[in-house]
Image (cartoon, rainbow, N blue to C red):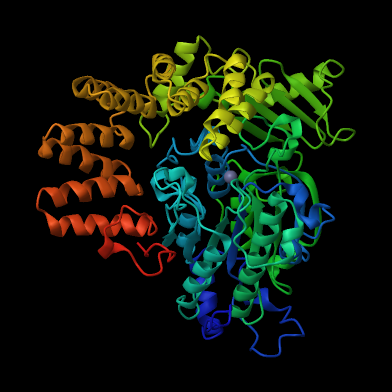
Amino acid sequence: MSDVPARGPRGRRSRAGRTAIALLLGGAALTVSCETGGPPADRTRLPAPVGPPDVLLITLDTFRADRAGCMGHPGGLTPAIDRILRPGLLARRAFAPTPLTAPSHASLLTGLEPPTHGVRENGMFRLREDVPTLGTLFGDGGFRTAAFIAAFPLHSRYGFSRGFDTYDEELELPRERTSVNVYARRPARRVVDAVLDWLRGVPAGERWFAWAHFFDPHHPWEVTSSLDRILDHPPYNREIRGMDHEIGRLWRGVTEWGGGRPPITAVVSDHGEGLGDHREVTHGILLHEETMRGLLGLAAPAGTEAARRLGRGIRESVARYSDLLPTLLDLAGLSVSDDVEGLSWFDPSARGKGAYGETYYPTLHYGWSPLLSWRDERWTYVEGPDPELFDRDSDPGERTDVIEAHPEVAARLAAQVAALARDPAREEISPVDPEAREKLLALGYVTGTTSDPRRGKNPKELIDAVNFLLRGISLSGTGDHAGALPFLQRAYRMDPDNVSVLFYLADCLRELGDPTTARAYYRRSVERNPQMPEAWSHLAQMEFDRGDLDRAIELAEEGLSHSPEAAVLLLSAGDFRRARGDGAAAESFYRRAVEAEPMHFDTWAALARLLESRGNRAEADRCWARARDLAPGRAELPERFRTPDSSRPPARR
Ligand SMILES: [Zn+2]
């Protein structure tokens, strides 16, 4: 079967019709003269396309800019991306606003910096309600719009679907971990299939804007591409090579659909990956080059006005992620609102601007200071308990702090940071998780720190605690709790107040058969931060296990008083009520759980089992069907819900 969808019926719209649409859209610059360059010579099989080009945004999760061939990597990891961007303009100094998926994508989609769009971390914040997205703006401009996301942090519940005609978030839960949303993802092959499927249905003469998100380079690494040669590469590179292979297939599909002409295309990584540089293994804690420098390139089809304006080569000015929205709208002939913070690359005042950066991950998860940063064409300033300055001209890897030699530069960049930074704990944010703000405040309050970047614990000094913690979690995940324990203990010795460390240490000790010590660590974690639903749930379960049902119920309710929508606690509360024989109360808790976590296998399964036991077979079956769609391979499914091929993807929702 061909990878390539049947070509859309382009070119049927009359010249008069196209001009009328261009005028309606207010795109005065966008006229039929866009096509004067004519089709490339090799387009023999299909008629030349007419009308202004469509627009494709490709975002690459966790992609280090230095892995791209077009950014100098010699390993041939990205032949498709290189080919897409070769005729276009590549930003040498593109910097993500955060090392985190949701906030970075929010900047790409809104043209705003994180303090303005309000998304400061994954899974906790909703995009500010009044902010238009690329979906809204291209839609208003007459485009058919679609997005295809590959990971849970970009789920519609966080506001990212705003304005898109189609928001395809059909994610897969890994077979072995079906209870945590954050692991829901979709491999590149299936993202590409979904885009090409959608393209087949785009009607005659309609312009489209599509956003395809690729998550494969994000850990855990498990290459799903059919490409064999990638086996020579280490795992991270292998994921990139496999993803690139699929992007090549996407590119051939959209180009063939366009009668041989590709869309205007942006390729951008949301952030990089530490891979041990500055001792950071993944991303989110520090703000250095390896996680903050982005791949950001744009290309337009040859012969179009967009290609003429874009030109070809390297853009030396600092490119901010907030600049992408105005630049893409500009290239597509749509007008740009003054409300966006970014500037179109064609606006001369965009030159010489610096890039803001922030991470509140250390604060939200570990109670440490946040880090903030500013980058201009030469310098990187990182604001934190121990501010640093790097001269990237002589030190591109940001290894040597030169703040003492250049205090005036540091002061200038610090002033830029201060002008943009806003403490999320003091903001009227719109958290999806109503606890996010309280969590910030509670951590600051309990640990005696604030989210003032100069006053908390220094993430840079404590980065090894994260490494030990992650190593411990990873070993525990494979069942090696004895192997995990020393790593968790080392993390604990470095940062004994860290609620995440306390929690995982407790979990590990519980697995190792030491409930007394485990209970003490769980207790300490909820004392330091009462919004730890898993810790409450485990505390309650331990009471249940030793036969104290009353105490188990009390603990679950205490946890729910702090986190009323935590599915894990709603499930525990339901289980305990069921154990007591109170089916009606259990059902009410399970219903709340599925409402809170509709992508959670365990919530649907729990409700299904209970409904069955209460004689409501019809509704039970509907719940089992939902559970099966989320995790077809789970053994808990009744026989009648198992399919012969349990590897089939979840049904379309
Ligand atoms: Zn990401």
Of 648 and 393, nearer the camera is 648
User: Which quadrant is the N terminus positioned in?
Assistant: bottom right
Residue 535 image offset from top left, x and y in percent: 38, 25
- The residue at the far right in this view is 394
Q: Residue at x 68, y 28 (%)?
A: 373
Residue nearer the viewer, 529 or 97? 529
Q: Residue furthest top?
A: 448
* Residue 634 x %, y %: 37, 54
185 over 193 or under it: above or below = above
Q: How many marks?
A: 0
- Determine if residue 207 is in view: yes
Question: Where on the image, by quarter, is ligand 1?
Answer: top right
Give the side of residue 454 with respect to residue 592, left or right.
right
Whether residue 111 appears in this view of the structure is no
Decide: is 410 above or below 288.
Answer: above
Q: Is residue 539 above or below residue 94?
A: above
Q: Is residue 408 left or right of residue 150?
A: right
414 displayed left or right of 177: right
Residue 127 in percent (x, y) is at 45, 41
In this rendering, the answer to whether 188 lies above or below 528 is below
- Image position, residue 432 (x, y; %): 38, 37
Pick the quarter of the image with the C terminus.
bottom left
Horizontal side, residue 518 vs residue 52: left or right: left
